[in-house]
Image: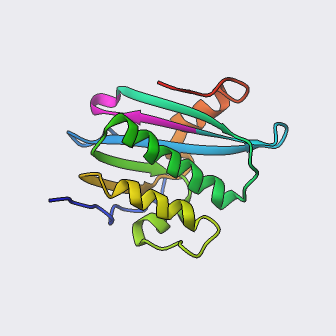
Amino acid sequence: MRLRVTNLPIHRQLVTWTLPPKGTSKVNFNGTFFQDQLAIRVCVVVRVARGAVMGSLSKRVIDLLDINCVEALETFKAIQFDADLGLQNVIFEGDSLSVVLAILHGNGSLSSFGHLMDAFRAIVGSFHHYGCVYVGRLGNRVARGLIRLVKHGPQFST
């Protein structure tokens, strides 16, 4: 039986990162448009019990998209990466309220990023348990820090 968690809280106050529940991974994702490179950099950090980093991903995307598409693309890259790692119990933490709401309420299909949300839902359907939480910029420091670190660096996944 598959359990889907879609009612995790939307945090509106100051958020600090907390350990994932036992048996669950936490995935922080972020994307930024670098005007000087005319490119988007998407970063994902996966952490498990006690906060240990299980994997990270940095991907440069050349296509120029609107900001909602950038945020949806980073979410899609995060779910692809988690599926590649074989994760089954995941909490996604992001700083895009519009994307988190689209995931939680299953809408967004008619938006500029609807095709990415449809692809997200297709992949996450194979997970045993997932949730998505809006954490704001302060709750997403690790992924944002990784983006600054790799701005001019290579793409990677570890």
41 w.r.t. 151: above or below = below
Q: In which image quadrant can residue 22 be found?
A: top left
- Where residue 10 sits in the image (x, y, percent)? 42, 62
Q: Is residue 17 visible?
A: no
Which residue is most to the left? 1
- The answer to whether 61 appears left or right of 141 in the picture is right
Residue that appears at 60% across and 64% down = 113
- Where residue 85 sits in the image (x, y, percent)? 36, 34
- The answer to whether 145 appears left or right of 44 in the picture is right
Which residue is most to the right? 36
User: 69 or 118: which is nearer to us?
Assistant: 118
26 w.r.t. 122: above or below = above
Residue that appears at 36% across and 55% down = 124
Residue that appears at 53% across and 72% down = 108
User: 50 or 6: which is nearer to us?
Assistant: 6
- The answer to whether 62 appears left or right of 54 in the picture is right
Task: Look at the image and give the residue range highlighted in magenta.
Answer: 43-51
Q: In which image quadrant can residue 81 be found?
A: top left
105 w.r.t. 134: above or below = below
Residue 77 forms part of the magenta stretch = no
